[in-house]
Image: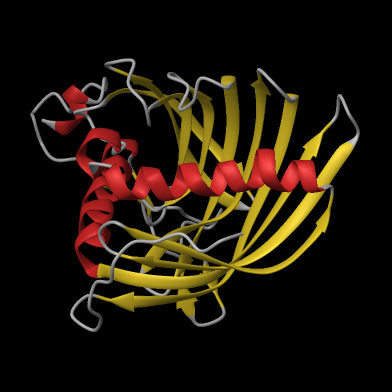
C-alpha cells in the first residue's frame, strides 16, 4: 500500500484512507457563501491524491507560456540584477526563454542568471520525470502534522530521498488538506547540479491554474565557488496552460540572452 511505502501506518483493517469532515462548533459543515467547504482529507489520502494528480498533469499538460522574473543578488560583492523573460514550455522536453528586459550588473546576468536558465533548459531536455518525481519510488515520507500556509490548511510531510541523485532533495512538502494539491516544497538539494555550486537551499510555492498546479515563486540560496553566496528569487505569472492534443512539439532551443 502507498501509506506503508510512504512511512505511514495504514488502518488496522487495511481500509483505504478516508476523509475527515471539518465541522463548525455547532456540528454543521461550515460554508463560504452558498458553497460548502470541502472536507479535510486524511494525510494518506492527501498524499495519494497528490501523486495521482501529478501523474495526470504530466499526461495532460501539453504546454504553457508565462512571464518569468528572476532577481539575483551576490551579497559578498553587492551586485544584483533582475531579468524579465517570456517562458514557453512544450512537453516533454522543450523549454524556451525570450528576453524582455534586464536591469543591474552584467556580471550577475552572465554568471548567475544565464547559467541558471541554461541549467533549467538542460534539465528539461534530459530529465526523466520518473527519476525526480516526489513519489514513494524516490522518497520516504514521514507525516509531521497539519499546519497552515497562506491561510490554507496543509498536511506536512518530511521527505528523504532513497538515493543521492541529481534532481532530488531532502526537506518537506506541504499538501492542501482539502484537495491534495501541492502548496509548498522546501529543503536542500542532495547532489549539486554543477561543480561551481556547493550547496543549495530552496523554498518553492505553487498555485492552481485551471486544472494544473504550477510553481509561482522560488527562493533559493546557494554557495558558489566563484561568486560566493548567491540569493535568487524567481517569480512566474500570467500562466497560459495548454491541455494535451491541442499543440505539436517543436525543437528545443535557447535564444541568445
- In the image, is 20 to the left or to the right of 171? left
Question: Where is residue 232, by image quadrant?
Answer: top right
- In the image, is 187 to the left or to the right of 141? right
Q: Residue at x 65, y 26 (%)?
A: 222
Q: Residue at x 77, y 41 (%)?
A: 107
Q: Nearer the viewer, residue 230 or 235?
A: 230
Question: Where is residue 86, by image quadrant?
Answer: bottom right
Q: Nearer the viewer, residue 213 or 38?
A: 213
Q: Nearer the viewer, residue 91 or 6?
A: 91
Q: Is residue 134 above or below residue 81?
A: above
Kindly tell me whether residue 29 is visible in this rendering. Answer: no
Q: Residue furthest right?
A: 78
Q: Is residue 142 above or below residue 33?
A: above
On-image quarter of the C terminus: bottom right
Q: Residue 256: horizontal and vertical position, in percent?
A: 56, 61
On-image quarter of the N terminus: top left
Q: Residue 33: horizontal and vertical position, in percent?
A: 57, 80
Q: Is residue 136 above or below residue 191?
A: below
Q: Is residue 119 above or below residue 254?
A: above
Amino acid at each position: 500500500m502507498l501509506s506503508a511505502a510512504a512511512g505511514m501506518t495504514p488502518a488496522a483493517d487495511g481500509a483505504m484512507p478516508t476523509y475527515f469532515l471539518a465541522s463548525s462548533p455547532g456540528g454543521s459543515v461550515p460554508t463560504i457563501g452558498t458553497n460548502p467547504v470541502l472536507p479535510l482529507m486524511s494525510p494518506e489520502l492527501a498524499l495519494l491524491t497528490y501523486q495521482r494528480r501529478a501523474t495526470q498533469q504530466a499526461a495532460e499538460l501539453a504546454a504553457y507560456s508565462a512571464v518569468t522574473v528572476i532577481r539575483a543578488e551576490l551579497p559578498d560583492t553587492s551586485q544584483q540584477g533582475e531579468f524579465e523573460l517570456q517562458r514557453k514550455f512544450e512537453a516533454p522536453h522543450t523549454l524556451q526563454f525570450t528576453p524582455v528586459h534586464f536591469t543591474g550588473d552584467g556580471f550577475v546576468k552572465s554568471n548567475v542568471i544565464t547559467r541558471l536558465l541554461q541549467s533549467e533548459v538542460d534539465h528539461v531536455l534530459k530529465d526523466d520525470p520518473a527519476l525526480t518525481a516526489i513519489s514513494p519510488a524516490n522518497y520516504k515520507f514521514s507525516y509531521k502534522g497539519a499546519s497552515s500556509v497562506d491561510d490554507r490548511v496543509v498536511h506536512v510531510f518530511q521527505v528523504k530521498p532513497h538515493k543521492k541523485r541529481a534532481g532530488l532533495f531532502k526537506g518537506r512538502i506541504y499538501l492542501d488538506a482539502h484537495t491534495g494539491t501541492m502548496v509548498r516544497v522546501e529543503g536542500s538539494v542532495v547532489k549539486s547540479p554543477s561543480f561551481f555550486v556547493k550547496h543549495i537551499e530552496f523554498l518553492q510555492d505553487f498555485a492552481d491554474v485551471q486544472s494544473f498546479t504550477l510553481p509561482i515563486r522560488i527562493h533559493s540560496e546557494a554557495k558558489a565557488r566563484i561568486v560566493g553566496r548567491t540569493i535568487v528569487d524567481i517569480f512566474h505569472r500570467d500562466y497560459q496552460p495548454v491541455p494535451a492534443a491541442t499543440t505539436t512539439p517543436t525543437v528545443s532551443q535557447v535564444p541568445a540572452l
